[in-house]
Image (cartoon, rainbow, N blue to C red):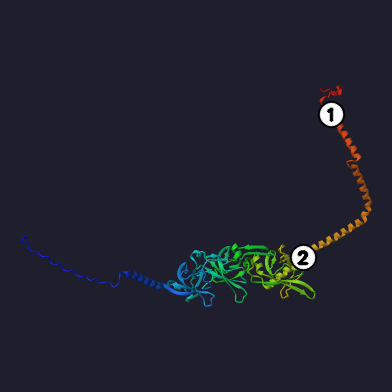
């Protein structure tokens, strides 16, 4: 070994220090569930903050409604969910609990309406077809009341008018409903412009009030002078004016309908919920109103069969009024029965028809003088047939120059106008006279035939027998097998042969004229 090298000894290796690790109080495996819990709490808090009030709806049936599935919608946007369905205490309906969204709380006014949207077939058409795949849902029509409610009675059918629908409602008063129903169309110039939204009987039971809704912009055509009438089904009327057939559309035949017309913009638009009269037909509705009515009585000594109340009173083609009453006028002194027809005359119609319209109608005294002058010239009332098919009659006012003089009975409770026998009765009298004449003629013919049989025939009988014998001999001579006929036929045959010989001679002379001198040449 080399002693010059220093001597080195191995140093001892220090012992490693023991590291002590601190354990985390929460294990990593709990982080994920903790995060999930926090998220759930956040969602729950958010749901609680977003959750609105809970409302209760009452329906007749829970058909189509499912817990936690059926939605409450407004404008096709879900704003709530059905949370419970249970029977009511009286078991006559169901109670549906709906959890609303917080933002939808202002929609819960006291007059808000709820209904179940499902497929329906009604007079107005088919609705709710989109729910065939998506399922039924509850619809909301917000109200305008300031009162707040949490319990509502749902509608059994969808309302035809909702709060934000543009248009106006009107009320029509009628004697009866006719064939109208909710959803029946409303027409203007044969165009559907609205619908019937409801009806109710009046408290006194003497009529009905029909509510209609006219869509915008057609509601502006409803003025204060507008007239409404039934346009239900087929309007067939047969009267003294003839036969009339009117129909709006095929839908009105099935579901009925209402039509309106008349008036213009100068009359001004009718306010919302204005009240109108619903007339039975278009003719009655558009008839110009008359403010002055004068009653008169016409007494007829003839049958008034075919004349009805409401029949027209006509003056040379102008409707002057109508029949208002028909009674029996019994005269005890004369033991006679006549028919008293009360008519309503409208003097304004005469004024409207005049070429030079007067500024005002004549006074009662002036009108009386005018009628007295007209009656003096033959002005009378007469029954006439207006329709030969139905036999319906009307009252005609006209001048009859040959009529007997008769005054107006002004002293009666209702003034009595003189009358003229009807043309039909005159025709019947003429027909009776003709029949009587024909009967007399037939009787004379019968007597003549009897005279011929009794007196003439016996005298001419021998002459008739001689004539028959002569005819028999003539028939014997002219028969085909009589001798005269056979001799005549033989004579005719001889004449025919002689004629043939003459034709042969004529032919020979034509070909050989010299044969008269030289004789006929022999044929080669």
Quadrant of the snapshot with the N terminus:
bottom left
Q: Which residue is mark 1?
A: 504
CB of mark 1 within 8 Å of CB of mark 2? Answer: no
Q: CA distance from mark 1 to mark 2?
A: 89 Å
Q: Quadrant of residue 377?
A: bottom right
Q: Position of residue 156 (x, y in %)?
A: 54, 71
Residue sitting nearer the eye, 12 or 132: 12
Q: Residue furthest bottom?
A: 89
User: Please, is residue 145 above or below residue 318 in the view?
Assistant: below
User: Is any part of residue 55 visible from this angle?
Assistant: yes
Q: Within 10 angstroms of label 2, few (less than 14), some, or many (20 or more) residues?
A: some
Q: Please state if 354 lies on the left or on the right of 302 as rendered.
A: left
Helix, strand or loop at label 1? It is helix
Residue at left offset 67%, top offset 66%: 319
Q: Which residue is mark 2?
A: 425
Percent of width and height locating residue 144: 48, 73
């Amino acid at each position: 070994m080399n002693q010059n090298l220093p001597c080195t000894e191995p140093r001892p290796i220090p012992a490693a220090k023991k590291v002590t690790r601190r354990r985390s109080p929460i294990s990593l495996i709990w982080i994920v569930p903790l995060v999930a819990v926090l998220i759930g709490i956040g969602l729950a808090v958010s749901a609680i903050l977003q959750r609105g009030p809970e409302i209760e709806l009452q329906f007749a049936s829970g058909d189509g409604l499912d817990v936690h599935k059926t939605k409450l919608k407004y404008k096709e946007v879900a704003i709530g969910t059905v949370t419970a369905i249970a029977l009511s205490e009286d078991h006559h309906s169901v109670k549906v609990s709906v959890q609303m969204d917080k933002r939808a709380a202002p929609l819960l006014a006291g007059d808000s309406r709820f209904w179940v949207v499902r497929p329906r077939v009604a007079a107005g058409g088919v609705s709710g077809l989109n729910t065939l795949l998506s399922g039924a849902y509850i619809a909301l029509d917000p109200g305008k009341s300031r009162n707040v409610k949490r319990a509502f009675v749902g509608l059994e059918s969808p309302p035809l008018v909702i709060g934000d629908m543009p248009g106006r409602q009107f009320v029509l008063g009628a004697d009866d409903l006719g064939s109208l129903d909710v959803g029946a169309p409303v027409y203007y110039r044969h165009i559907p412009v609205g619908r019937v939204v409801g009806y109710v009987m009046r408290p006194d039971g003497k009529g009905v009030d029909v509510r209609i809704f006219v869509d915008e912009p057609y509601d502006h055509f409803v003025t204060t002078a507008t007239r409404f009438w039934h346009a239900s089904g087929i309007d067939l009327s047969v009267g003294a004016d003839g036969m009339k057939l009117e129909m709006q559309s095929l839908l009105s035949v099935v579901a009925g309908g209402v039509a309106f017309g008349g008036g213009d913009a100068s009359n001004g638009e009718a306010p919302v919920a204005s009240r109108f009269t619903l007339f039975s037909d278009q003719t009655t509705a558009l008839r110009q109103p008359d403010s002055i009515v004068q009653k008169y009585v016409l007494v007829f000594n003839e049958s008034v069969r075919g004349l009805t109340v409401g029949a027209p009173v006509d003056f040379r083609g102008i409707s002057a009024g109508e029949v208002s009453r028909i009674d029996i006028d019994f005269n005890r002194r004369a033991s006679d029965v006549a028919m008293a027809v009360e008519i309503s005359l409208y003097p304004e119609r005469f004024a409207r028809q005049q070429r030079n319209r007067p500024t005002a109608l004549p006074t009662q005294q002036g009108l009386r003088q005018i009628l007295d002058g007209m009656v003096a010239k033959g002005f009378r009332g007469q029954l006439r047939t207006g329709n030969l098919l139905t036999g319906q009659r009307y009252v005609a006012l006209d001048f009859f120059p040959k009529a007997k003089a008769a005054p107006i009975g002004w002293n009666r409770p209702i003034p009595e106008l003189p009358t003229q026998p009807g043309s039909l009765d005159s025709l019947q009298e003429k027909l009776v006279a003709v029949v009587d004449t024909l009967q007399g003629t037939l009787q004379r013919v019968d007597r003549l035939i009897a005279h011929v049989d009794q007196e003439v025939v016996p005298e001419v009988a021998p002459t008739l027998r001689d004539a028959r014998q002569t005819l028999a001999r003539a028939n014997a001579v002219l028969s085909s097998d009589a001798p005269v006929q056979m001799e005549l036929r033989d004579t005719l045959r001889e004449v025919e042969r002689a004629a043939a010989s003459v034709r042969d001679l004529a032919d020979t002379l034509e070909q050989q004229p010299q044969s008269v001198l030289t004789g006929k040449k022999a044929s080669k």
